[in-house]
Image: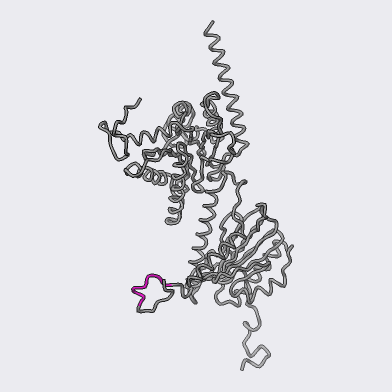
Amino acid sequence: MASSGSGYDLSSSTFSPDGRIFQIEYAAKAVENAGTALGLRCRDGVVLAVEKPLQNKMLVAKTTGRRIHTVDEHAGVAMTGFVSDGRQIVNRAREEASSYNETYGTKIPPTTLAARLSAYVHYFTLHGALRPFGASTLVAAYDPATKKHSLHMVEPSGVSYEYFGAAAGRGRQPARTEMEKLAINPKTAGGVGSTTTEGMESLITVADGVKQLAKIIHSLHDEAKDKPFELEMSWLSEGTGWKHAGVPRNVIKEAVEWAKKEIEEAEEESDEDDDEMEE
Amino acid sequence: LPAQSTHADALTASNQATTRPITTGTSVLGIKYRDGVMLAADTLCSYGSLAKYKNARRLLGVNSNTLIGASGEYSDLQSISDLLKANALEDRCTADSLYDEDNNEECAGEVWSYLRAVMYQRRSKMNPLWNDVVVAGFRQETDGRTSDSPFLGVVDKIGTAYEDDVLATGFGGYIALPLMREKFRPDMEEGEARALLEDCLRILFYRDCRALNRVQIAKVTKEGGVLVSDPYELDTYWDFKGFVLNKGELGTDGGW
């Protein structure tokens, strides 16, 4: 358990004696308790997936409370945590992307977009009068200049890193473990070199990525404890012409069916193993 | 803000309104045909009497089903195009759903109405965008489906909005429009419409001092969306007796 703030946690402009800013940690807690958001950088694109818990039986689940948003043609953002805070970050991302385009005549490069959001989120951790954002944002984007696609995650503290696979929210620890098993890191998948063509070719495709993320989200979801949820997925790939778009609904449906089957088979196997062990 | 300031005030004046266009494009022609709408324009931007930019694009797609073309000040066309494209992008990003088929893109008729509002606002501030803008595409049904009926409209620099089956701006209104009106039928084939527009552009090249025979044709169809051709040259014929022969050989009064 984290040590109690006792006086050093009242403002984000106060350090604690052991060098922490508690308000930022509390903001991260808000994200940790929210629905899982996952991002996967695949060979031919990036996939985003968010578990959207349905607070109310009467919600129009399929369309309302969206957590994945298009920021520009070539960039999409998934968020989790306080969704109202997340919406502000999405709006800012749209402004950054459109003003960059108006000024320079080209699409904002992914690293620049992530850096701008990072700076924006960080700003709110410096002022006593403001509170930090209680939301993490996963940014999937394509750079038409370098022809590379990438995934970044911006956290409430304002840090942002580029990832092969990123997870935020409730199920992030087990999700990370599962993602590490996938062939998404060119260094380990290809064996030699980082982003050499050899390394990249052995990575999974977005089609696989969609299935794997569906499986991860469904396996993390506890039918008994957690609320029913809606799965939102989007991708940005060679197949979509490098435009951010929702994963077609039938593709999500097939992925979920495949995922449920895989999970069932895995459970049966582990049941059999348990039986064997008992004997 | 004063719309005009005297020369003496120029040093201290904050903003001066548009008084004259500098880099200009000439006629834009538009015609509806069986599959949709077709626009045509040459690729010249004149700098007064200098034919300065001979490969300028005056026909532009602004979203997947709307085409605009403009005559007049080229920088204002670029500004209008940026504005409409930014609107289309914003609409796409902030749409209700991540799926294209759920969303309604702004149709040509809506773009035309919006442009009318923009142009009229500017004129009311005595600082117009110095263009005649032609908007081509399809209308939208009240239930949101793209209509089968093509849309062709124009908005001028003072904010007059007009729609019709055939349109032409600038010199085209005097020379091409009568020809286009004569030949127009709602079920014209693409080849016919294109031949008619090319013929009109050729005639405009003969008669309009600020025209060029390097042209572009663009079309909007339901299936294909917006398609803008690459520029190409039109053949012209100067073998008229009046040009080739001496005036004395023509058999008339010898030109005196």
Residue shown at the point (46%, 49%) measured from the top left: A94
Q: Does A63 appear above or below A215?
A: below
Split into 4 quadrants, where in the image is the C terminus of chain A?
top right
Outermost top residue? A279
Residue furthest to the left: A17
Vertically, is B184 above or below B207?
A: above
**Residue A77 rendering spot, x and y as whole percentages:** 48, 42
Image: B190 above or below B11: above
Q: Nearer the viewer, residue A109 or B5?
A: B5
Secondary structure that dominates the magenta span: loop
Image position, residue B6 (x, y; %): 39, 79
Q: Position of residue A104 (x, y in %)?
A: 42, 55
Of residue A27 and residue A145, the one placed in the foreground of this image is A27
Which residue: 41% across, 38% down?
A: A134
Instruction: Check the picture and name the quadrant holding the N terminus of chain A.
Output: top left
Frontmost residue, B201 versus A63:
A63
Instruction: In the rendered view, tell whether residue B141 sits above or below residue B101.
Output: below
Colouring mode (rainbow / by chain / secondary structure / one colour): one colour
Q: Give residue B67's quadrant in the image.
A: bottom right
In screen coordinates, is A115 left or right of B118?
Answer: left
Task: Look at the image and say whether residue B11 sits in the magenta stretch.
Answer: yes
* Left-right relation of B52 to B183: left
In percent of width and height, residue A144 lies at: 48, 48
Q: Which contiguous range is marked in magenta?
A: B9-16
